[in-house]
Image (cartoon, rainbow, N blue to C red):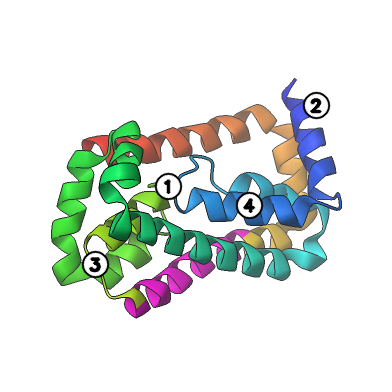
Amino acid sequence: MLQRLYARALEVAAGPNALWALILVAFAESSFFPIPPDVLLVPMVLAKPYRAWRYAAVCTVASVVGGLFGYAIGYFLFDAIGRPILEFYHAMDRYDALKTGFDQWGVWIIILKGMTPIPYKLITIASGVAHFDLAAFVGASIISRSLRFFMVAALLWYFGDAARVFIERRLTLVTTLFAVALVGGFVVLRYL
């Protein structure tokens, strides 16, 4: 079953609407959606490695624009939308600590946390609620998200067929590690 899903993901990633799907997922993940854009970025780069840098750039831009939407949720609509999103992810206690840290370490929080499995939407919404400087938020988001997505693209571009063979031979292991990283991000968010 995993092999069929993987084959389908590669097929979609090579298809004509893959870039739009990547844009949509990268945008949504930065403000409310739980699935990271890596689920599309990885098969897209594997399917067309010569477009790795383009995909990473598009993913970065869409993620930063989605981050602005998350920032707006926190800034203007925290009680109506932001709080329910954070409560859904059981992130209110972590959010309170994050909000306090923004005064002293805001840019570094955005840069460092934006590269981890910790959901980026927490950072974007908290930045808006804290009324963090918008220019600093955008700059830190560009650094953070470009480091993350270009690193993924670079590794896949460099290892190319070896990465594809590894993924195909150890698909269960790869999907398990991805799921552990995704769930681990939420667990870290919840308990740290």
Is 100 located above or below residue 39 in the figure? below
> Do the numbered discs 4 and 1 sit on residues whose CB atoms are within 8 Å?
no
Residue 121: x %, y % from top left: 40, 51
Q: CA distance from mark 4 to mark 3?
A: 26 Å
Task: Give the mark toward the camera: 2 or 4.
Answer: 4
Q: CA distance from mark 1 to mark 3?
A: 24 Å
Secondary structure beneath disc 3?
loop
Residues in magenta?
Answer: 135-152
Which label was assigned to residue 4? Answer: 2
* Dot placed on the residue nearer the N-terminal end, 1 or 3: 1
Is 192 located above or below residue 173 in the figure? below
Q: Say which amino acid is labelled 3.
A: His
Q: CA distance from mark 4 to mark 1?
A: 19 Å
Which residue lies at the image location 68% right of the left edge and 32% below the top edge? 170
Residue 28: x %, y % from top left: 53, 50
Quadrant in the rendering for residue 107: bottom left
Which residue lies at the image location 22% right of the left edge and 48% below the top edge? 95
* Dot placed on the residue nearer the N-terminal end, 4 or 3: 4
Q: What residue is pinned by disc 1?
A: 117
Task: Give the mark toward the camera: 3 or 2.
Answer: 3
Q: Is residue 146 highlighted in magenta?
A: yes
Q: Say which amino acid is labelled 2.
A: Arg
Q: How many marks?
A: 4
Quadrant in the rendering for residue 12: top right
Q: CA distance from mark 3 to mark 2?
A: 46 Å
Residue 191: x %, y % from top left: 22, 35
